[in-house]
Amino acid sequence: MSWSLRSLPEGGALVEITSRVIQGRYLLRPDARGRVNELVLGVIGRAQELTAMPIVAISVLSTHFHILAVPEDAQQMAKFMKHVAGNISDEIGRLHDWPGSLFVRRYTSIEVSPEEEDQVNRLRYILAAGVKEGLVERAIDWPGVHSARALTCDQPLRGWWFDRSQEYAARRRREDFGRFDYATEYTIKLTPLPCWAHMRAKEHQRRVKDLIREIERESAAERQASGATVLGAESVMAMDPHYRPAKLARSPAPKFHARRKRVRQAMWEAYAWIVMEYRKAAERLLAGDQEVRFPEGTFPPGLPFVPYPPRAQPP
């Protein structure tokens, strides 16, 4: 398959990032001991520290995860996700005896428009994880990684990064060491939506609580109308992580999240211009022009990322 061009507008944007587990297996299924949670949060926390990635919200279900973030450019996003995907594959693969990559393909990133309605809708979507699928009744009941408690109850998302290189060296020295002797705890820092950045912390918390109440109320009404029941956290944690569904639901991901036609059209036009310029530059490079310049904010084939020029500092 061909990948869409990785590019973000100058100054960055709100982006919904998604990675799906290979074959739809339940390898990210939370466990009663909390091992999956601590590993996933440790990896994401370390990736955030290494790349300074602003994260708005996270939800991790058994077969996929969503991260709502505000990368400054495509390079920051790529570095962040390289660390996240690679190390989650290693850690969860070690935990569940799964060889190779945990994920079916490269992550999907969908730019969200600057409009408040669109940004709030994407936050709402991530907060609904676990509830909208009928797995738990309340967002805070989801036993896996979820932002609900961190955003409403001031309970930070914390995990552990295990330095496997140091552990390996210690074993080579025949050293006895404890599980956390070569581990570092990381706390993920959450940042508000760009459209809510001006709000005080209490107002931001109130808005998120309202969203969660609305999600839970609508989901309860849908269950009542259909006669469905909630699976429950214990049943979720009892699932076989190697279970493979017979059929996977597939739907094409949009390039942008924008409800208003004029906003979506403007985003498409900006992206189409970059793609056109990128293709022109690629053709010139293929023809042997070593001085060709690719559009700023893109990854030329086999060449370093082309950054945007530094912004002038106010006097």
Image: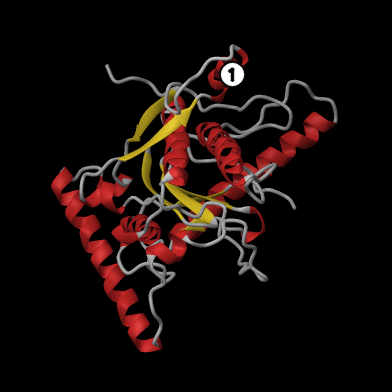
In the rendered image, the vertical position of residue 124 relative to residue 112, given as above or below? below
Is residue 205 placed above or below 282 in the rendered structure?
A: below
Toward the viewer: 181 or 248? 181
Q: Position of residue 75 (x, y in %)?
A: 55, 32
- Residue 247 in the image: state x and y as whole percent: 66, 71
Count the marks: how many? 1
Q: Secondary structure at mark 1?
A: helix
Residue 286 visible in rendering:
yes
Residue at screen point 24% across, 66% down: 213
Determine the residue positioned at 29% across, 58% down. 140
Residue 185's place in the image compared with 38, above or below, is above
Which residue occupies the foreground of this view, 299 or 263? Answer: 299
Q: Is residue 7 left or right of residue 15?
A: right
Crowding around mark 1 (Cα neighbors within 10 Å: few <14, some 14 to 19, many 20+) is: few
Which residue is denoted by mark 1 in the rendering?
171
Identify the residue at image location x=26%, y=62%.
Answer: 211
Horizontally, is 16 left or right of 94 in the view?
Answer: left
Residue sitting at 61 percent across and 33 percent down? 295
Query: Is residue 220 shown above or below 234?
Result: below
Q: Amino acid at mark 1?
A: Arg
Scheme by which the image is coloured: secondary structure
Return the x and y of residue 86 as percentages of the image width and height: 60, 36
